[in-house]
Amino acid sequence: MPRRYTSFWSLPSGEVRNSMAENISRVQTHISGLDDKLSGGIPEGYNIVIWGSVGTLKTSIAYNIAYKAAQAGRNTIYFSLEQVSSVLCQQMTMMGMDIKNVEDHMTVVDIGALRRATHILEADEPMDIDWGKVVLNHVMALRESKKIDLCVIDSLNVFSMFTPKEKKRSILFHTFRKMKESGMTALFIVEDDDKSGNGNSGVARFLADGSINTSVEVKGRTTTRLLQVEKLRSTAHSTDFYPLLFDKDQFKILTK
């Protein structure tokens, strides 16, 4: 059964609002049971944060969305700033998502590829590089050259780790604004790093158009992964927590 923590502003508020939501072009999450609750999926061109603690399938969920979008003919790019792209793709292949099947529409870029593309040498000091600017500029260049429709940044923590604390909010605001102006649908993975709301997750969730929370509930020796749509603009939705499963190469939530 879903855990119910429902806020009044996220629920349907009449036929007009529902009709408007249904007329918005959307990107499917391909999580069985979820898209039906989101009027078909995530609105195109929105900035979405997927956040949670370690081991809650954030990367797999984002990759799944990008992969299935590529299967549908959308041009997607996945920036893996934590893992080597070959390792990530191998893991995703084991989950039924072989990059070779969508290589005409999906590109995975890691730090090594980013260094080569931007002529940053291995010997260059990381602290001397504005990685946020490097990644953003590269995203925008690929947006033009490859006509990218959907972009994933994994993770925003690495993206902003060299950003001075006093500039974090303004730089994240600039990044979200540039993504929004580009017209791309952008998914930002964020490791939950601060319960106060002032860390990467708190600031990103405040700035984003949508926020998807992944978590783990432990009862005795039983662990259950949960998914919650914390907010999603232009969409009438529940903020319930739903059990999240991956079975037979497909994500699904349990709604009953």
Image (cartoon, rainbow, N blue to C red):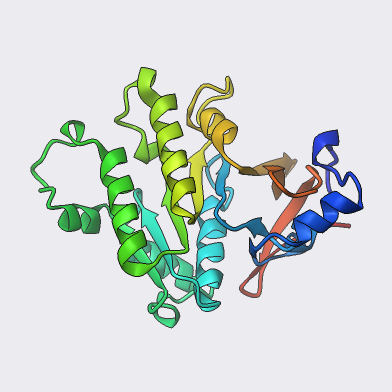
Residue lying at the far right in this picture: please name it.
14
Residue at 61% across / 42% down in the picture? 209
**Is residue 73 found left or right of 163 in the rendered image?**
right
Indicate the position of residue 92 as horizontal and vertical percent values.
47, 67
Q: Does the image show residue 128?
A: yes
Quadrant of the drawing holding the C terminus = bottom right
Question: Exactly how many numbered labels are in the figure?
Answer: 0
Quadrant assignment, res 142: bottom left
Vertical relation: 44 (above or below) 120: below
Q: Classify 133 as above or below 245.
A: above
- Left-right relation of 208 to 116: right
Q: Can residue 223 be seen?
A: no
Quarter occupied by residue 83: bottom left
User: Is 3 located above or below residue 84 in the figure?
Assistant: above
Report the side of 115 relative to 201 (left or right).
left
User: Considering depth in this image, is 210 or 223 the residue closer to the camera?
Assistant: 210
- Placement of 113 over or under 237, stated as above or below: below
Closer to us: 229 or 23: 23
Return the residue found at the far bottom. 101
Q: Residue 29: percent from the left, percent from the top?
A: 64, 62
User: Where residue 10 sits in the image (x, y, percent)?
Assistant: 80, 41
Q: Position of residue 153 (x, y in %)?
A: 42, 50
Name the residue: 48% across, 56% down: 184
Residue under the image location 49 percent in, 47 percent down:
180
